[in-house]
Amino acid sequence: MGTAGRHLAFPFRIAPDGRTTTPATDGDHVRDEVLQLLLTDPGERPFATEFGGGVRRLVFEPASDALRGVTKARITQALTRWLGHRLTVEALEVELEGERIDVVVTFRPAGTPDSRVLRFQRQGR
């Protein structure tokens, strides 16, 4: 039995009927959880200071091979620690081209055959 409809959507929003929006499926909820995790900076939550993937911090980092490795490690660790029971990471790509940084996460929500892809991109300054 799925849990669709029992969670708030991320980002939080209000439906046309005035109620809070909920994810349509468990897969949508897992996608929302991945977004929330990766867009939260470690230390941002006072009572869960280690929670977060820190993708937003990439805006302030110079593009380099070291950044590619650190980013892959940080995201892999966050996904494994906080959402390892909810999904399987199928691929994680960090591409650098000049000042552009692309992070592409391919994952499969637990119990589903379908893969999902999330892309985060930073353009040059």
Image (spheres, rainbow, N blue to C red):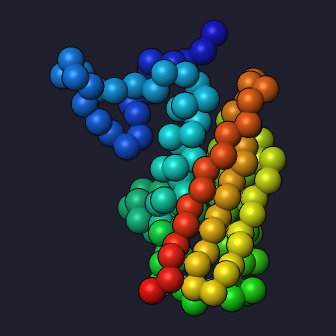
- Determine whether 33 is above or below 65 in the image: above
Marker count (numbered): 0
- Determine whether 63 is above or below 114 in the image: below
Which residue is most to the top? 1
Residue at left offset 75%, top offset 86%: 65
Residue at left offset 76%, top offset 77%: 69
Quadrant showing the C terminus: bottom left
Measuring from the top left, give residue 62's x and y in whole percent: 57, 90
Residue at left offset 34%, top offset 27%: 21
Quadrant showing the N terminus: top right
Measuring from the top left, give residue 98's x and y in whole percent: 63, 87
Q: Can residue 51 be seen in this view?
A: no
Measuring from the top left, give residue 22's x and y in whole percent: 40, 25
Q: Which of 48 and 42 lies nearest the eye of the viewer? A: 42
Q: Can residue 92 be seen in this view?
A: yes
- Determine whether 34 is above or below 5 in the image: below
Measuring from the top left, give residue 14's x and y in whole percent: 25, 30
Q: Which of 107 and 47 lies nearest the eye of the viewer? A: 107
Residue at left offset 48%, top offset 50%: 36
